[in-house]
Amino acid sequence: MRLPPALSFLVDEATGMTGADRFLATLGAKLMAGSLPLAGGALTELPTHPIIAQHSWLWRADTGRVIEGLGFGAAGLGQAVPAAAARDWLVGLGEVHETPVGATARLGWATSRPLRPAELRLLHEVARFATAPLAVLAARATQAVLLETYLGKRSAARVLAGRLRREPGEIIQAALLYADLRGFTELSEASAPPEVIATLDAWFDRIAGAVHAFGGEVLKFIGDGILAIFPIGQRGAPAACDAAIRAVAAARAGMDHLDRSRAAQGLPSLPFGTALHVGEMLWGNIGTADRLDFTAIGPSVNLVSRLEGLCRPLGRPVLLSGAFAAATSHPSIPLGRHRLRGIAAPCAVFGLPA
């Protein structure tokens, strides 16, 4: 017996879709090819994600376009905003028919007229047949999210592309940012472990959030330090360096607000130093044959981490290398040439105006 177009698609093609948006649009088109009077469709999932609680895709039959909606928090399916918004959106298009797909997804359709019994049975069959391909798509998305969460986007993309062996790596041209909390060892010795973790989370939220907001990427969390880059690419070194300076300003503003909150609770402030440099580094797999890590190495990485160590002796919260100061459009103050531990040539060091 020949299957209807929608069921044939779910059996033979759906697992090859590149994402839920393409899945929903193609499935809707196949249902329409089977003479179902669709006005639109919606797919809502509960993804495995550190901050996204729900993900919805909304498809219009007249245009074929798909838009996405996100919900944040811990509400269950059907309770958070995206699920409710998806149903309201379908109601605006026509008569709504919703069916669960497995335990973590729901398909909904809006039709331009009431459906006949055979058409309703087809939608229920579609939901049943969609369980397996949607589980495959969800597993792929979960894999990508887990890798990005623990490795960052740049490294995750390489792992997903099959870069699972030791290799020479690639050269990245970027503005580099290294930031480190001051006095954290003493703070951790005097605080309970849950308080230490909460403090680190609050610090990383602000510095990493600022980096991401201005187009940078966190490469490594190193104890209470962070290494981030602002890739140069087509935008050029001045734009990358200016973005890094704006990220530092945003991070300092966020930490100032956090320090005021901590002071109100009788907690000490969290001073930190930041160093900025521009140059190239090697980014790739190192480690043992069966335990690898994507990491950044090279003279530029060494320099920016050592430069941050001068923040306290020079009494400056932010230091720039000579290369960075020459590339950025922001004004800077020369602080002389200084020797950095483990680096042969003295480094020209600059600060920022107050």
Image (cartoon, rainbow, N blue to C red):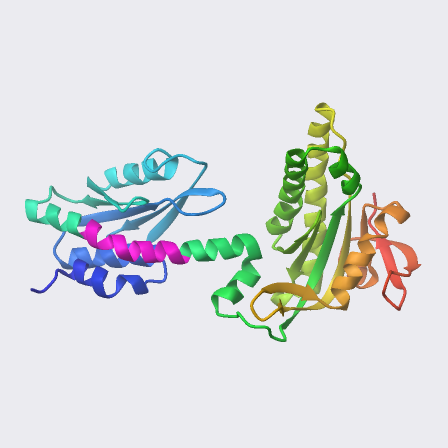
- Side of 296 where 79 appears, left or right: left
**Total number of numbered discs in the rendering:** 0
Residue 115 visible? The answer is: yes
Instruction: Give whichever of 88, 72 is nearer the camera.
Output: 72
Residue located 92% across and 57% down the image: 336
Image: magenta residue range = 126-140
Q: Position of residue 196 (x, y in %)?
A: 68, 37
Among the 4 quarters of the image, the one containing residue 143: bottom left
Residue 64 visible? The answer is: no
Assign the C terminus to one quadrant of the image.
top right
Residue located 82% across and 49% down the image: 352
Q: Position of residue 236 (x, y in %)?
A: 67, 65
Instruction: Give whichever of 233, 131 is nearer the camera.
Output: 131
Assign the N terminus to one quadrant of the image.
bottom left
Residue located 16% across and 47% down the image: 124
The verdict on residue 84 being magenta is no
